[in-house]
Image (cartoon, rainbow, N blue to C red):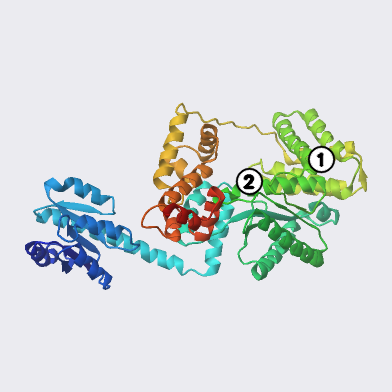
Amino acid sequence: MYKLLIVDDEPMTREYMKAQVNSLHREWICAGEAGDGREALELLEQGEDYDLIVTDIKMPIMTGLELARELAGRGSRPRMVILSGYDEFALAKEAMQYGVHDYMLKPIVNEELVSVLDKMAKELAAERAEQAALQSLLVLSEQSRGQIARNFLHALISDNNMEIKLLYPLLHRLKISLIEAEGAIMLVDLDEGQLLERDISPTDLVLFRYIVHQTCAELAASDSPSIVLFSDNEQRTALLVPGEDAANVRQRCAAIFGKLSAAVQEMTGLQLWGSVGSSEMEVLQLGQSYRLAREALWRKLIAGEDALLATEDGAPDASDEQTGNQAEQTVAAVHRAMLEGRYAQLYASLLSLAEAAGTADRRSVLRTGACLLQVLAETMPKEKRQHQTAAALLLLRDTALTQELYRPEEAAKLYERMIESLYNTPQKESAVQETDGSEHEIVKRAKEYILAHYAEPLSLALIAEKLGVSPGYLSSLFHQNTLEPYIKFLTRIRMERAAQLLQMRPAEKVYDVAEKVGYLSVKHFSYVFKQHFGIPPGEYQERAVR
């Protein structure tokens, strides 16, 4: 049964509602009455609970419009329906700005009243069902909530837009805040060259990676519970490491990696490698952090230098930039050569990479080969990847273990045989190019959608779906036309709206402003606001209201 409060200065209207509501709609009773808005507020402040307020728009002392305006500033309030005359339609429209759900014309017509009560009952039933489902989610165990966070991060780094669309709003509803200020993705992996040199089967890589993952999970649980641990598509251990700022994130990554590396070395005798991507303020940018970490790890494994790569901006160190660029160019050239069947070009590209390293020992050759194989395997269909990659790794290991040192031409030949075994049949690339004549119109519509929904959990995938384009196309188009990624545009809109709210009189609470512009955590909101305006939101508000 739903409870209605009638607010009207005419006693006859109140008596009519009390007598007729339940007979007209069995799900409703008129549980209270007030002669003006002030009396209605007093009833609510005494703790009376109502599902719906039906109020006249013009009354002495406090009008229905003033009541709607007063209740709009409160977090939890009943639904409202306005009663108005034909000449008060402009006031009724104004009332809709304060969260009023509907209006009826006076004198009240039974059919219209039944229609409004039925509509309100259905909306309340849906709300209650939604709240019940949310409460069920909120009592999930920490383990279940952690799994949701891990699944979301894996979807993010895998560009799984379907999963992102499902899980990102769920994070908001469960109030799972992954970062409070900034955070970065750190990747850790074993030195595959060392594993292969020790004649460990490629199929046993999974076991050793599992040991790394479990060791990391134990360290994170005991020392850093705010860290989220998950795996990428190559079964490498990935960690979301949050911190107070970029420098703090780097310090935390270095400390965790040091402990993890020592523990793995003690248990297995194997060397661990790691890399840290860019430090980001927005959760949806963590995919970029992961990509930078993956590229850095790959470059370092080929170069065989520092065990942990971490720079201030996620870019390559100057010392390995040349090696990294050459490695990336080699992979691109190798991929093209295999697709086009140009095997002379394949060997020339591999020789160029091997010459940069000079005469190499067996472990370096194994490591470089395994890294090349890993990156090239990502371009293959999933159903072929596992079997053919394992076969190519076995060929690499069995051949490379025959000698201690390799001249560049010997290493290049070894890589060539390995890669040819990976691609049993040359594949043709299928290029699908999206075209659309209304590029500027799409960006305009994207901006309009962001402006209308900035307080909601907006992902690029969700916006792209609303506009009927692919996320990749929208991302590229948005950047080309605005010279900034959509996430920066969204953050700027949120910050500008937050500034407006902080300047309002009476002053808004900072935690209310944070929620109204789409932030789960007031700490995270305050950090982003300070980065944007140079001062904390509280200080900004104090200056604005002076």
Q: Nearer the viewer, residue 145 or 195?
A: 145
Residue 21: x percent and y percent? 13, 64
Q: Which residue matches tag 2?
A: 382
Amino acid type, mark 2: Lys
Q: Nearer the viewer, mark 1 or mark 2?
A: 1
Tag shown at residue 292: none
- Dot placed on the residue nearer the N-terminal end, 1 or 2: 2
The residue under the point 15% across, 48% down is: 88
- Crowd rating for badge 1 (residues with CA inside 10 Å; few <14, some 14–19, many 20+): many
Quarter of the image with the C terminus is: bottom left
- Confirm whether residue 467 shows in the render: no
Asked if residue 43 is positioned above or below residue 235 in the image, the reply reads below
- Crowd rating for badge 2 (residues with CA inside 10 Å; few <14, some 14–19, many 20+): few
- Confirm whether residue 375 shows in the render: yes
Asked if residue 434 is positioned above or below residue 144 in the image, the reply reads above
Furthest-right residue in view? 404
- Give the image quarter of residue 365: top right
Q: Which residue matches tag 1?
A: 415
Secondary structure category for the residue under label 1: helix
The residue under the point 53% across, 60% down is: 523
The residue under the point 41% across, 39% down is: 448
Left or right of 474? Residue 357 is right
Residue 319: x percent and y percent? 80, 43
Residue 348: x percent and y percent? 82, 31
Furthest-top residue in view? 437
